[in-house]
Image (cartoon, helix red, strand yellow):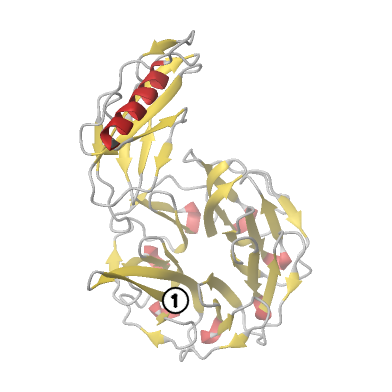
Amino acid sequence: MKKLALLLASLVLAIAAAGCGSKGSPADYPANFTVTPGDGAVTVSWTEVPGVEYWIFYGPGSDITTTNWALSGGSVIVKPTSPRVIGGLTNGRTYSFTINARTDGGPGGPGAPTQVAVPQLAGANWAVGTPLGTARLNGSASGVGAAGYAVIAVGDGGVIHTSLNGAAYTAPANPSAPVDLNAVGYGGIGWVAAGDNGTLLFTQDGSTWTAKTSGSSANLYGVATLGNVGFAVVGAGGTILTSTDATTWTPGVSGTTSDLYAAALGTIRYVVVGAGGTILTTTDGVNWATTPSGVTNDLRGAAFAAIATVVDEQAVVTNQYVAVGAGGMILTSTDGLAWTVQPSPTTADLQAVIYGTQFVAVGKGGGIFTSPDGKAWTARTSGTTNDLATVVRTLSGYSAFGAAGTNVTSF
């Protein structure tokens, strides 16, 4: 019965793919069809022709075609645009891809020669991209907004660079320029960028930005998500601001006058890090407490991961906070309260850290370092000696940005 059901489903999909009853016609498959493997994903690109509709067929194995994809456990994406990132793939597994085309909803034409790709863990190999202008880029974030998936980088002079749905970066207008922007974060409803003199900007689509009133004149250095929807912003003199709508901002009582640089939301509690080894924690985003770090180094970056491993055939999840900072300092904690100094692969200042499928930290002199658990770190070759100030997880890997518009990627 299962085989019969699968056969019937395949037949229905084949009829739809053939454009039964439509007045359209098949078209040749597109030129320059390529599939680039990434981390748990691939990027599919091709040369689009106006008025032509494309379908991508893909699945496990090396021989997916436009006719066997359903029986091979594959999938189809109808009417994608180029480039298209396909996520949810398993690293180390072989997948194959093809694409065909039609006009006016007609039957699909011949499929492009099948492309094979094997997604791999990103972070080991990095490529230097075209600089995004000449200004230092201080913060970056990614997420899904009103116009689709976006990666955003912000920096000195109020520069903003946005890549929508994998396309090339553009430079949207900033209503608060030329005030420096120090950070940007995604909070479910859009992105908030923060900068000097209490500057806050908000966008829902990554392109149209509006200025918001923060109620603070402090320089703002870090932005992080506040739960599923909302933002936490931290800055000079112990400044903490929170908002659920990016419009109304509430000051928090941090209990410190130290500059605060970054924040990370974990499943247990929120962690904020700052100057002189400062660490603050909260479980509700309102009541903050100082937590001893055991160090006096400025802490510039923070990240959290719930790392799943298999022990005795059972899935085990370990919570891990990581904080990084001056002099190559690396701290870890499983609860945000008790912190341990970890051996560092560098004495150079570390400026930021993030977790995607592993921890990635970046810093001075183009330093990039990766770790599966926050404890054992490996130095990577970034291809640049420019300082790196921020790193972001993308759909297919990581991007890091820094001095002179430096832009390096790994996928």
Residue indicated by mark 1: 321
Name which quarter of the figure residue 362 lies in: bottom left
In-image side of 192 versus 40 (left or right): right
Question: Residue at 48% of width from left, 16% of height from top?
Answer: 105
| Residue 105 position (above or below residue 320) | above
Q: Which residue, as the protein is rendered here, is positioned at the far left?
A: 62
Q: What count of labels does the image hold? A: 1
Residue 57: x and y in percent read 34, 30
Location of the N terminus (image quadrant): top left
The reply, left or right, for residue 9 in relation to residue 210 is left
Label 1: few (<14), some or many (≥20) within 10 Å?
many
Q: Position of residue 108 (x, y in %)?
A: 38, 17
Q: Position of residue 92 (x, y in %)?
A: 23, 51
Q: Secondary structure under badge 1?
A: strand
In this view, the residue farthest toward the front is 1
Residue 88 coordinates in the image, percent (x, y)? 38, 48
Residue 179, by quadrant, is bottom right
- Pick whichever, 30 or 319, lies toward us: 319
Q: Is residue 91 visible?
A: yes
- 67 sits left or right of 290 in the view: left
Q: Residue at x 52, y 53 (%)?
A: 142
Question: At label 1, which amino acid type do we have?
Answer: Tyr
> Visible in this render: residue 136?
no
Asked whether, in this view, residue 58 is left or right of residue 395, the answer is left
Query: Is the residue 107 above or below the residue 130 in the image?
Result: above
